[in-house]
Amino acid sequence: MTGELWLVRHGETEWSRSGQHTGRTDIPLTPAGEAAATAMRAGLADHDFAQVITSPLSRARDTARLAGFGDAEVVDDLAEWDYGDYEGRTTPDIRDEITGWSLWTHGVVNGETAEQVAERLDRVVERARSVDGDTLAFAHGHSLCALAARWLGLPISDGRLFRLETTTVSVLGEWHEAPVVKRWSSAV
């Protein structure tokens, strides 16, 4: 590994605030989400990144732009999990139908499988490890938790072990040549 992988979860949206699963629906940032993304600018400006990439969804692209990275490269592999029939629904709502349901253990109906998500996030890991320097990635809650699991060499289901707040920074790196979480879900 030659650098760190910095993860930024997009700013607040109406659905992130209400707990609705927001996969491929393109929900805009709330005014609070825009303000929080803008506030990240000062904390990220002094770091030199070899590459800056973003999910194609506007909530991630807008977070990148407001944080000072309007030229971030759009990378389709950073899109949020495709929740299929569970798009726009909350976990308690889904659990009314499926006792104990979890994205990490039960998956979704008519959406992406964990294997499909792992395949595309493994490409993001490889991309970050192939550059000389640090990578900054703007994306989404579940996809970034899953990305952290893949960085660490864990199965996608271990993404359940991470909680990621909106408009936060996490840093993945290495220690004694082993992949590690250096910082998680923190303010810039």
Image: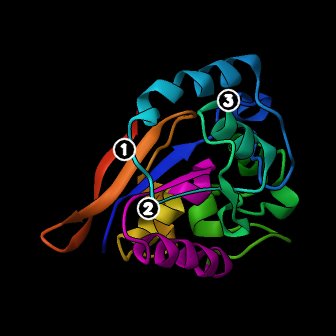
Residue 20's place in the image compared with 109, above or below, is above
Q: CA–CA distance between discs 2 and 1?
A: 10 Å
Residue identified by numbered label 1 = 184
Q: Which amino acid does label 2 sit on?
A: Ala
Q: Which of 41 and 158 is in front in this view?
A: 41
Residue at image mark 3 = 12
Question: Is residue 121 a member of the stretch shown in magenta?
Answer: yes
Helix, strand or loop for the magenta stretch, by majority: helix
As drawn, the label of residue 148 is 2
* Real-space CA distance between mark 3 and mark 2, rounded to the nearest whole angstrom: 21 Å
Which of the 4 quarters of the picture holds residue 79?
bottom right
Q: Position of residue 177 (x, y in %)?
A: 18, 74
Placement of the N terminus among the 4 image quadrants:
bottom left
For the magenta stretch, what is the residue range? 115-144
Per the image, label 2 sits on a secondary structure element best described as: helix
Q: How crowded is mark 3: few (under 14 residues within 10 Å), some or many (20 or more)?
A: many
The answer to whether mark 2 and mark 1 are in CB contact below 8 A is: yes
